[in-house]
Image: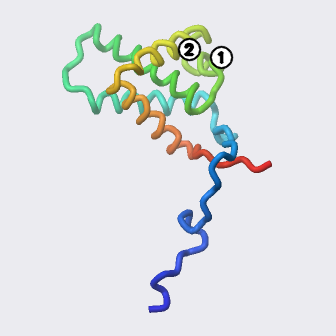
Amino acid sequence: MPFENQVEPSCPLSQPAMPAGLPLAPPQLPATLPLKTACRIVRQLTGELVLLLGDRIMLRRDRRRFACHVRQISMYVCHVALQISQSDIGEAFGRDRTTVGHACHVVEDRRDDPAFDDFVSTVERLVTTIFGLVEVPAYD
């Protein structure tokens, strides 16, 4: 069969592997996407994932705590995965940049828990996939 082993040239699997050790380009949001919209998408995704993994009905104080945790994780992911400045994140969330810094510290401290770390890693992977921010080797 003549077509059996042919790979389409535009297929990513047919591209040669990049040598290890090349510097990676920092991820960037598309220029047409406002930062506020990107942060809102991250917040919505985080909230949906928390609800998906939750197993109990929330009381009033739990809803407030839920909203706070979602916001903190979202701020952290926006800063770490999307590399948005803390000032811009604060503006997008209607908070101060110091609040964003506090949220990043809180999430970073909670990542010692393996289950929480897995959750945040999943959110980070999904966000980079959604925004198409794959790490591409930078060529000098």
Residue holding disc 2: 100
Along the line of sight, the residue nearer the viewer: 33 or 103: 103
Task: Evaluate if marks 1 and 2 touch, with contact meaning CB atoms under 8 Å apart.
Answer: yes
> Please, what is the three-letter code of the amino acid marked with disc 1?
Ser
Asked if residue 98 is positioned above or below residue 17 in the image, the reply reads above
- SS assignment at label 1: helix
Looking at the image, the residue that sits furthest to the right is 140
Asked if residue 98 is positioned above or below residue 74 in the image, the reply reads above
Q: Residue at x 76, y 50 (%)?
A: 139
Q: Position of residue 38 (x, y in %)?
A: 56, 33
Asked if residue 66 is positioned above or below residue 22 in the image, the reply reads above
Please give left or right for residue 89 compared with residue 5 in the image: right
- SS assignment at label 2: helix
Q: Position of residue 21 (x, y in %)?
A: 66, 46
Neighbour tally class for label 2: few under 14, some 14-19, many 20 plus, Cα within 10 Å: many
Q: Residue at x 64, y 33 (%)?
A: 34
